[in-house]
Image (spheres, coloured by chain):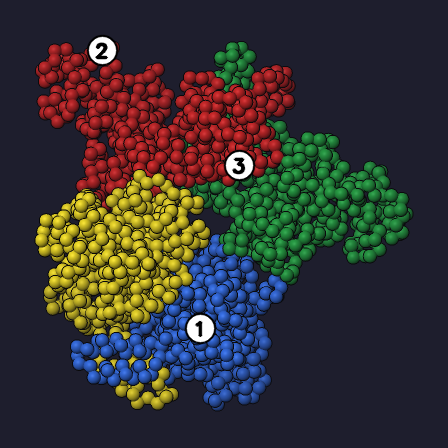
Chain colours: A yellow, B blue, C red, D green
Amino acid sequence: MTKQDMQAEQKKEAAEPTQTAVRSQGSFLDRTLVRLVNLWRDVSDTVTGTVDAGLSAEGDIRRLRDQMQACLEGRGGEVSARARAAGLGRTYLSLDELGRERFLRLLAGAFDADRTEIDAAVAALQEAGPDDRPKAESTLRAALEAPRTRLLTQFNALPQGVKFLVDLRADLMAHARKDATLASLDEDLRRLLESWFDIGFLDLRRMTWDAPAALLEKLIAYEAVHEIRSWEDLKNRLDSDRRCFAFFHPRMPDEPLIFVEVALVDGMADNIHDLLDEKAPLVDPARNADTAIFYSISNAQRGLGGISFGGFLIKRVVDLLTTEYPGLKTFATLSPIPGFRRWLSREIEAGRTPLTPAEADAICQVTGFEEPNDALTRALDAEHWHQDEHMIEALRGPLMRLSAEYLVNEKRRGTRAVDPVAHFHLTNGARVERLNWLGDTTANGMARSAGMMVNYLYVSDRIEENHESYTGEGRVTASSSVTRLLKS
Amino acid sequence: MTKQDMQAEQKKEAAEPTQTAVRSQGSFLDRTLVRLVNLWRDVSDTVTGTVDAGLSAEGDIRRLRDQMQACLEGRGGEVSARARAAGLGRTYLSLDELGRERFLRLLAGAFDADRTEIDAAVAALQEAGPDDRPKAESTLRAALEAPRTRLLTQFNALPQGVKFLVDLRADLMAHARKDATLASLDEDLRRLLESWFDIGFLDLRRMTWDAPAALLEKLIAYEAVHEIRSWEDLKNRLDSDRRCFAFFHPRMPDEPLIFVEVALVDGMADNIHDLLDEKAPLVDPARNADTAIFYSISNAQRGLGGISFGGFLIKRVVDLLTTEYPGLKTFATLSPIPGFRRWLSREIEAGRTPLTPAEADAICQVTGFEEPNDALTRALDAEHWHQDEHMIEALRGPLMRLSAEYLVNEKRRGTRAVDPVAHFHLTNGARVERLNWLGDTTANGMARSAGMMVNYLYVSDRIEENHESYTGEGRVTASSSVTRLLKS
Amino acid sequence: MTKQDMQAEQKKEAAEPTQTAVRSQGSFLDRTLVRLVNLWRDVSDTVTGTVDAGLSAEGDIRRLRDQMQACLEGRGGEVSARARAAGLGRTYLSLDELGRERFLRLLAGAFDADRTEIDAAVAALQEAGPDDRPKAESTLRAALEAPRTRLLTQFNALPQGVKFLVDLRADLMAHARKDATLASLDEDLRRLLESWFDIGFLDLRRMTWDAPAALLEKLIAYEAVHEIRSWEDLKNRLDSDRRCFAFFHPRMPDEPLIFVEVALVDGMADNIHDLLDEKAPLVDPARNADTAIFYSISNAQRGLGGISFGGFLIKRVVDLLTTEYPGLKTFATLSPIPGFRRWLSREIEAGRTPLTPAEADAICQVTGFEEPNDALTRALDAEHWHQDEHMIEALRGPLMRLSAEYLVNEKRRGTRAVDPVAHFHLTNGARVERLNWLGDTTANGMARSAGMMVNYLYVSDRIEENHESYTGEGRVTASSSVTRLLKS
Amino acid sequence: MTKQDMQAEQKKEAAEPTQTAVRSQGSFLDRTLVRLVNLWRDVSDTVTGTVDAGLSAEGDIRRLRDQMQACLEGRGGEVSARARAAGLGRTYLSLDELGRERFLRLLAGAFDADRTEIDAAVAALQEAGPDDRPKAESTLRAALEAPRTRLLTQFNALPQGVKFLVDLRADLMAHARKDATLASLDEDLRRLLESWFDIGFLDLRRMTWDAPAALLEKLIAYEAVHEIRSWEDLKNRLDSDRRCFAFFHPRMPDEPLIFVEVALVDGMADNIHDLLDEKAPLVDPARNADTAIFYSISNAQRGLGGISFGGFLIKRVVDLLTTEYPGLKTFATLSPIPGFRRWLSREIEAGRTPLTPAEADAICQVTGFEEPNDALTRALDAEHWHQDEHMIEALRGPLMRLSAEYLVNEKRRGTRAVDPVAHFHLTNGARVERLNWLGDTTANGMARSAGMMVNYLYVSDRIEENHESYTGEGRVTASSSVTRLLKS
């Protein structure tokens, strides 16, 4: 692969509008792995023979199982175990997708917890008297611990070993959806990573223009909400009235886990274009800023899916900013509503008419269609409708109201907000503060959020209460301006 | 407490001959705690009322339980939880010994795993079909996890919180011996610390004379084998032909966990006095050293008891030194035999006569006693016998033989060497290489090891084999010079 | 100024083909100064009144003179002196070009050495006996030292004060050409900076992709030979088979003084396009590189003009690379011949015909012009002639020969090579190794060097000899391939 | 030399009461030099032959001169010049005292400025018209610059080269007193070091207990006012209510140039014993301290004699402390009066009777001597007189008065305080604030200051005025309590 190919690929990744909060990191991962293979070659020269990329030979699988077994037993002490782990890692990295799945399946199947042992421990627990009970519980707990977990733990002593496991889990998650055994391995690995990546072990670092270019480059690649278009765009987001903070793990010092971008502004921002405008005048945050706007938060490690850092990150950053700038009074997000358009389509498909008769009339008139749902669909599909005054007039009312309804009332299983971003901030104790008409008119913003954006507001002495009422009863707290929209 | 008092106390600690491999750190711990109380005052102002040092009031205990409950539930989000944990920590630190025991008992008892929940999960597991089994195991595993573990985890986000837990466990270990509930809490905390202090997360650092004085001071305090008498003595142990390495945890960067002292010498050292002699000429390790002698290894954190770093430390240091000095051919220890004298006394008390008739005669003659065992006891009790030629002549033969027998043949439960230092190195795969007559004639060395020292030898391509045969069958590998002693 | 304006301006700077080895740094300097003004506001609040940007008022000038006098006398001790220097600095920075010239003129004129004092010291020296002579010389030396030098020295204690003086000298150099008093001040400042920036005080640092973006950005701005077109281009120049080294001063840690870019390649590179090609395959420098090509060297601080670091930088880098890669056998440059085209035009204007009759015929035929000089001029002026086979055939012979003649034989005052890049490398002891036809076909390369490039070769045990013969007799050492061109 | 010898020697140095403000650093210097010889061996293998330690052979001197000449001319470029300088340095370090003197004499004599050149430049200056004058001055200035200065400059590019020059000057200063040529070389080197060690280039660092032991060890060795008796004593001086600050040069990062010790206390300290008492209770400087006492200031580099950092150090530290502790209202020293006893002895020897009749009577009575001067001398010579109440009663009055007179009125050449410590602080703008009876009853304090100590007070808005009146008219500012003593 030439340098240009690499860069082009990376560029492409950076340029694609992303559908989920975690970007596809395909080629990045691959390159990291190439580096790992070289690193680990020094640790392990003893890897037995080469294996075809698809791991199709029976003999290879048998040899691999023996190698795993030896690694697990720690034969020859820690140093040998380390070399064996490195050997296993190199083998894994040399495999193609199918080969990796086979590798994972072998690990999941051959080194699962021993059912006989579990059943025996269960029986012993049931017979244990009060005094023997603690010991019986301890034995059962040990029996439930699959050996494969101990095997995975061995990798943390290797250079970049923790990153390897995180990336291995990214592979695993894809397969886990369709396979119970792999799902069970995924669960073991998730628990292991969760204990290692406990919030107490993470470092919060501010990212500035003085950070290494090799690190800043990763922000460009991992940004999942509003694409970073160039180094100038990036510099603008790290500038004097902008802030960027990231969590790091001591064993992955070059890899951000999650990062948040903040703008220090005067008044609550109502659209993303002004925030990202490189021509916008600078604000002196010590004098003129009263509001911190969290306008982007991106998970950088797909393999840490299901382990949550975001809420803590926001609160730590609020603490830091409050100390540095006592003038900041308002802490709010400026967020997309990424599930809005899809929800609206489904409503229509399901035959529900979300429009009032007056709204329906207006839209039919502007679009020239007779069926209101059809008219709404066509209107939202039309390119650049946000530049057409008539369309704007016809759509503003219904979309403001519908997005409010979507955020406040639409629940999954009765308690969980359908919109993933809403669910995240509501769980953290924020409230739905304001809907912003045409807050994001990029292609991506139009396609997913119908151009709408929303501010979630964090009020420190309401956070607990909001959090309780949302996680308890599924009740969404919203400002009066939003609830007024619902009633209209 | 005046500064001088503090220093006197610390001096005293440093000066006392230690009975175990981990020094009593009483006052050190106390001072650390004082610092913690101040640190955490900033985090938490909300701690409810003061509590008497003995934690004797019913009401206080009830309030404390509520506080623990709130902390556990994470009411009000992570930041509040953090403040609550800090409040609990400050309360704990303000208690006296009895109060702390009550605190720990409360934590152990009120936040243990829920038996009903466990029993239900067990029942569900037993009824589960093959497909439901993974989920049922997962549920059972969760049920077995005591809530108190999650509560303890909260402390890691506090400044110095990990050190707090390590020191709390040092308190706990004392109580755990006599109380099953506390033992069960201790077991939970041990497992938690074991996962955090996994060898893969530790940093190996060389300690030199360029290290901060505040850190070097701790080496003086924690040294457990051969007391560091002064800063000059310390400097000598860090000098050009000496090495000192320690493991650190990223969240306790100022606290060594364990450290080892190494001398680079020409030929295998046979006594400790030459190694610690500040008048000894310098060796150029790059040219004249063929042997690395590990002459002291000390655990620094009592609260990490039962979690083993030593074997890995030695092997990592061997790796490092091999790379830096290709001329090093031999890696060995110079170790005390700390259980030898006590074992000998017990043998005699038990009526076993460890001496041959000729040996018995010689000792009786030199000491003027008639009963050989009595004579041997009196001889070893005599002050400065090692300066008396006749005594030396009479004792050398039997003590060399007996120490060899003690090391090679004395086992607990048939497989574990009675001597703790021997057990440590044999488990690591070393062999008993050479016994050294009058290798340590300090008061401590005479009292515990009868002046004997031993070299354990690490031969890299024998380590695995030695380790297997010792841990498997309890067979101790020894050199021919040592086995000859046995036969004599 | 909006952010975009700033960036556009900086972009423009970076994009303009540069005529000299030091880029115009106008706006960069201005922004640095803005930062300085803020920094120094904290040091000095005592600056007396504001001054108009042109410094036109008599009263202002008088007050400024008093302030300089007070600063010079160190009234009130060092701290006051520091505040006064900061005040003077802020005043200077607030002035426009004319105001600055007046400021400098005031400093030069009012604080020059005292002629009466010098004359008295001269007289004393002439009358001094042998014993008094050292003291008399010392007195004379002190008299010759202008007070303004001491005043300038005061700035080094300010934050960024050394950078301020360097930039002030950049201003001064422009004026010094036309004014003897300012030239004399410039000479004082040059001597001061020369002693501070003595090579022994500089730090050599490798610039990698892990360097702060804020620093790498300056490489883009300061690159003076082959424009850095993008961050990808930059990354490519810092990559595994590329190296970049810079000198820094301890008091200007964020400002490179000079930097060199090196490619590690297999065989001596003959054109710049391959070196800068982002599609080119990577070379493993430890295995496949036998040659280090120095393809760009840029001075970054205009205000350090006349103080030479380049030769030392090259030699230090050669030392470093030799140690790291013993496989490197050849150290050479790939350099432009920036004065070649201009020299050729002057030759023609002066009526000298540089072509042989055969060459003249060929060129006339290809171009359709009758007069050979005219034909040559037109040919070289034609856009894209290097893409026309007939042109190439007609021009290759004469341009190879003429560029060889230009480099080897054209001297200023008989001993100094006319070409500035040639003069630099010949002074350092390199030799003219090879001429490269169409080595640089960028617009800039065609316009200045007629597409030619040259390799200067550094052979370590010939450097001294080459240096002596060039600096002594003006004799240029060249390879046989180059001398053959001369004879042809 | 064994390790113990080294340490004993260093101990001795640290223990000796010092007579001057800069400690003899004999053996320290020697050891540094040994290290240098090794460092420079790598740079230079080309040193021509070995030389006897006394440098007595004519041929050796001739060869050395050639080597200096080659080094000066920079033959073969910078790298060769560097190797040659390292060779010269190694030769110098291998010489004994006499050999070094010869080396320095050679350097001073053979590479002095050229008188013919100077005389020609003087003549040209005298004939120069107004336009040629700047150039003529420049030429003369260059002619006055001795080549040996350029040669010395070469050393700064060597590792530890700046330290080498500083130590070389320490050697040189000893010889310079008795030899005009060497004095002239010393003057050149002093000017060179003065420009390099300009205050603007120095780093101020706080020394804490977290500093490297290798650095703290130097504070113990270099402390020149109140001996640091142990590491505990040192720790006490760096503790929470103590401060220590030092200046460093970027090219000598491991060598303090000068350091000051400060105590943060409540009220102006009146004796040194309380300040250094390790049993004294800790003061919380943020709450209870209103006064910063500068109780020790030591120059660490004898070779920087005559280059002043002390005044600036005090003022920078005052600034720092003021910012950190706004509660500090008073900044004062607690200083010895090191010349007081000697001055008193000279007064008496010169036949002046410093006592009033009543004082004389009292002393004669207490001592039993008849002649008052004799009685005073005997009294002060008596061991432990400060523990005898009668002596105290008789001596307090006269010694308080006489020390006030000594400090305020005794001048050298009419304007400079005889006492060196007084001269230092008065020049800095402090005033004589209070005399402290029996402020220092150590052997050293009794022997030099007759047990007296003095507080010099720094009042920030009086510093300029005090400085002016002292340096201008030699007028010493004193508090009313001190002036009252004069009148009594």
Q: Quadrant of the C terminus of chain A?
A: bottom left
Which chain does the numbered disc 2 sit on?
A: C
Q: Is residue C294 above or below residue B199?
A: above
Please rate how many residues cluster around mark 2, counting C-alpha atoms within 10 Å: few if below 14, some from 14 to 19, many from 20: few
**Residue B321 showing in the rendered view:** no
Residue C433 percent location from the top left of the image: 25, 28
At label 3, the amino acid type is Ser
Which is more toward the observer, D182 or D394?
Answer: D394
> Sequence-wise, which precedes: disc 2 or disc 3?
3
Q: Residue at x 27, y 62 (%)?
A: A408
Gap in Å between the C-alphas at discs 2 and 3? 63 Å
Is mark 2 in CB contact (under 8 Å) with mark 1?
no
Which is more toward the observer, C424 or C215?
Answer: C215
The secondary structure type at the circle numbered 3 is loop
Residue receiving disc 2:
C352
At label 2, the amino acid type is Arg
Residue receiving disc 3:
C44
Position of C11 with respect to B52 (left or right) is left
Say which of marks 2 and 1 sits in front. Answer: 1
Gap in Å between the C-alphas at discs 2 and 1? 99 Å
Please rate how many residues cluster around mark 3, counting C-alpha atoms within 10 Å: few if below 14, some from 14 to 19, many from 20: some
Q: Is residue D320 above or below residue B303?
A: above
Gap in Å between the C-alphas at discs 1 and 3? 53 Å
Residue receiving disc 1:
B67
